[in-house]
């Protein structure tokens, strides 16, 4: 009899037999944990041979550990390796973006969207095409089967497919996968464990990059840093990340990743927001936090505006302020060092920033967005290079 535990994800739980310590808790309705196939039910069955699903998952899990790709995943600044070198290479590639067209020949980029997009969709597809790749775009909420993401659920409702089958199937059709899956603000641990994208990383068997996940938007932050490098007037510019009001509760992904990158870059980095909007320590990492927005803006070279909902308990995902004194206007920009205005877009005018500031010559939101093609191309290139 074979219970398929030796190589199976169940081994991670120390499961040795059907009468093992795997408790009913593991079988109860729960959100799929990090490494979501751990405890997958088929492995519990005594069989002459491992079930097909289990065998497939074991293969993908083991195979993914022996990846020949230089970059297996991209979810944060550390995945880039040497940051200065990455920026330098990206800027070089921008001058000749079709030089690597041979790398992507007969390779397929799959872009999976759980949420809407304009820039990420277009720039990442363009990046793949620059590299000679075929691209497939899957909008999970438009035309695909609705996906169940919790295990233990009796699937008698609206969702006919489980993500635990869908991920390895998607991996079978491509060479690289980009995933967009925003925070849902229902369960902070579920969001901050990056439950969805981590399952793609572990079980697709292919390199996976974030196209904005629950806690980070690293392609955006990489493009932001490339843009700052292009527009900076002094070696170590002052860069200010400012919260600004918004009518809807937005995830912390963009400010988290921006802080993640600025903390590793050669910049004087300051974060300003109303009290209660403190970001997670793992992203702030001791950066200066100034609650007086005007003071924070003094002598700044770059102003990066973004809204985010509260992160700290008990207000996770809530809007604590809509104070339009925080809207970036000529009043605040006047105390800067003729700062450039940045925003990841889309932006709500006259909530986040006034018309005159975003339309001013100091606004670099369009070149910033254009650099999304470059950051995506650098990352995908690393993933398909042998
Ligand atoms: N900045 C950004 O990611 O834009 P989209 O949401 O339009 O992709």
Image: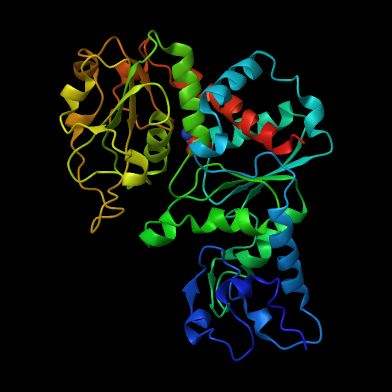
State left or right for residue 336 relative to residue 75. Answer: left
Nearest the viewer among 125 and 230 is 230
Q: Is residue 285 left or right of residue 162?
A: left
Residue 66 horizontal/vertical position (percent)? 73, 52
Q: Is residue 143 something one can see in this rendering? A: yes
Q: Residue at x 77, y 79 (%)?
A: 50
Measured from the top left, where is residue 299 in percent x and y? 24, 14
Quadrant in the picture for the N terminus: bottom right
- In percent of width and height, residue 111 lies at 65, 44
Residue 137 place in picture, x, y as percent: 67, 44
Q: Residue furthest right?
A: 106
| 385 sits to left or right of 243 | right
**As displayed, is residue 300 above or below residue 168?**
above
Q: What number of labels is visible? A: 0
**Residue sitting nearer the eye, 291 or 184:** 291
The residue drawn where x is 69% and y is 61% is: 61
- Looking at the image, is 305 positioned above or below residue 40? above
Colour scheme of the rendered structure: rainbow
The residue positioned 43% from the left and 17% from the top of the image is 364
Which residue is situated farthest in the bottom direction here?
A: 19
Q: Nearer the viewer, residue 211 or 248?
A: 211
Give the quarter of the figure containing the C terminus: top right
């Amino acid at each position: 009899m074979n219970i398929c535990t030796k190589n199976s994800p169940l081994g991670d739980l120390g499961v040795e037999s059907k009468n093992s310590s795997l408790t009913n808790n593991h079988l109860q309705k729960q959100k799929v944990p990090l490494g979501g196939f751990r405890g997958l039910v088929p492995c519990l069955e005594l069989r002459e041979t491992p079930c097909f699903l289990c065998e497939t998952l074991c293969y993908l899990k083991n195979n993914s550990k022996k990846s020949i790709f230089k970059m297996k995943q991209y979810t944060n600044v550390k995945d880039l390796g040497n940051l200065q070198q990455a920026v330098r290479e990206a800027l070089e590639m921008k001058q000749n973006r079709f030089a690597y067209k041979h790398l992507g020949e007969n390779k397929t980029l799959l872009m999976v969207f759980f949420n809407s997009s304009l820039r990420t969709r277009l720039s990442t597809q363009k990046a793949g095409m620059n590299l000679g790749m075929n691209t497939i775009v899957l909008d999970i909420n438009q035309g695909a089967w609705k996906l169940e993401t919790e295990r233990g659920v009796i699937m008698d409702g609206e969702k006919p497919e489980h993500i635990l089958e869908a991920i390895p199937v998607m991996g079978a059709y491509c060479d690289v996968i980009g995933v967009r899956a925003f925070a849902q603000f229902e369960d902070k641990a579920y969001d901050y464990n990056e439950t969805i994208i981590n399952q793609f990383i572990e079980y697709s068997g292919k390199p996976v990059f974030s196209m904005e996940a629950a806690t980070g938007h690293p392609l955006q932050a990489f493009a932001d840093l490339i843009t700052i490098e292009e527009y900076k007037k002094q070696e170590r510019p002052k860069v200010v990340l400012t919260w600004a009001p918004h009518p809807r509760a937005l995830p912390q992904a963009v400010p988290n990743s921006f802080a993640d990158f600025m903390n590793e870059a050669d910049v004087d980095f300051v974060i300003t927001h109303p009290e209660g909007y403190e970001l997670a320590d793992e992203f702030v990492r001791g950066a200066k936090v100034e609650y007086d927005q005007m003071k924070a803006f003094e002598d700044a070279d770059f102003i990066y505006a973004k809204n985010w909902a509260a992160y700290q308990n008990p207000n996770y995902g809530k809007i604590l302020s809509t104070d339009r004194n925080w809207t970036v206007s000529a009043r605040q920009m006047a105390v800067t060092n003729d700062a450039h205005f940045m925003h990841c877009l889309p932006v709500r005018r006259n909530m986040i920033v006034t018309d005159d500031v975003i339309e001013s010559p100091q606004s670099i939101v369009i070149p910033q967005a254009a650099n999304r093609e470059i950051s995506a191309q650098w990352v995908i290139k690393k993933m398909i290079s042998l």
